[in-house]
Amino acid sequence: MSVKDGGNGSSTSLKKFLVRHPLFTFLLMGGCFLVMGIISLNLVYLFHANFEFISEYGVMALREGGLIQFIGLAGSGYVALVFYVLFKACEKALVEWLTERQLGKHTPSDALDKLSPSKRNQSPNHEDSAVR
C-alpha cells in the first residue's frame, strides 16, 4: 500500500478510533504533550554537558560512562519523538473531526467518490457548448 492509501491497516484503524473518540483523543494528546515536555526538558543541557565531559576528558570519560550516558540520552530523545508523533496524530484526528462536524460529515472527497467517472473529469462550471 502507498502512503496515500494510509499505509497499513493498523494506522487506518488507529486513525478511525481517534476520529470517533474526540474526548479520548484530546486527553491522549495532552498526555503526550506533557510526557514529551518532561522527557525533553533538560535533554539539550544534558547533551551539552555530556559533550563537554567527553571533549575535556576524552577516552577516560568514555570509560567512566560518557558513551553509555550519550546512548541513553539519544534513546530518551527518540522516546520523546515517539510521543511527539503520537501528539501530531491526535492533533490531525481532532482537526479532521472538527472539519467533518462543521461540514455535516460529508467531505468534498466523499461527494467526488459518488460521481460517475465521466462526471468526475468535468469541472462544475463547465457548460456543454451545444446548449449555448
Image (cartoon, rainbow, N blue to C red):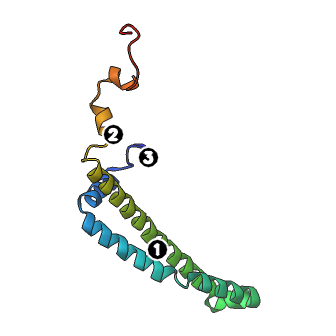
Give the number of the disc on residue 108.
2
- Residue at image position (29%, 60%) is 18
Type of the residue with mark 3: Val
Name the quarter where the N terminus is drawn: top left
Residue under label 3: 3
Residue under pointer 1: 79
In space, the residues marked 3 and 1 are separated at their CA atoms by 24 Å
Q: In the structure shown, which secondary structural element does the residue marked by tag 1 occupy?
A: helix
Q: Distance between the residues labelled 1 and 2?
A: 37 Å
Residue drawn at (29%, 52%) of the image: 102
Q: Is residue 102 above or below residue 60?
A: above
Measuring 36% from the left and 70% from the top, which residue is drawn there? Answer: 29
Camera-near label (1 vs 2) is 2
Which quarter shows the C terminus?
top left
| Quadrant housing residue 53 | bottom right
Numbered disc 3: secondary structure? loop
Q: Which amino acid does label 2 sit on?
A: Pro
Q: Determine the secondary structure under disc 2.
A: helix
Q: Decide: few, some or many residues near mark 3? Use Cα within 10 Å; few <14, some 14-19, many ≥20.
A: few
Asked where in the image residue 43 lies, by quadrant, the reply is bottom right
Seen in the picture, residue 93 relative to 103 is either above or below; the reply is below
Give percent across and percent down for residue 107.
31, 43
Q: Earlier in the sequence, mark 3 or mark 2?
A: 3
Residue 45 is situated, as x and y percent measured from the top left of the image, at: 61, 85
Horizontal and vertical percent for residue 3? 43, 46
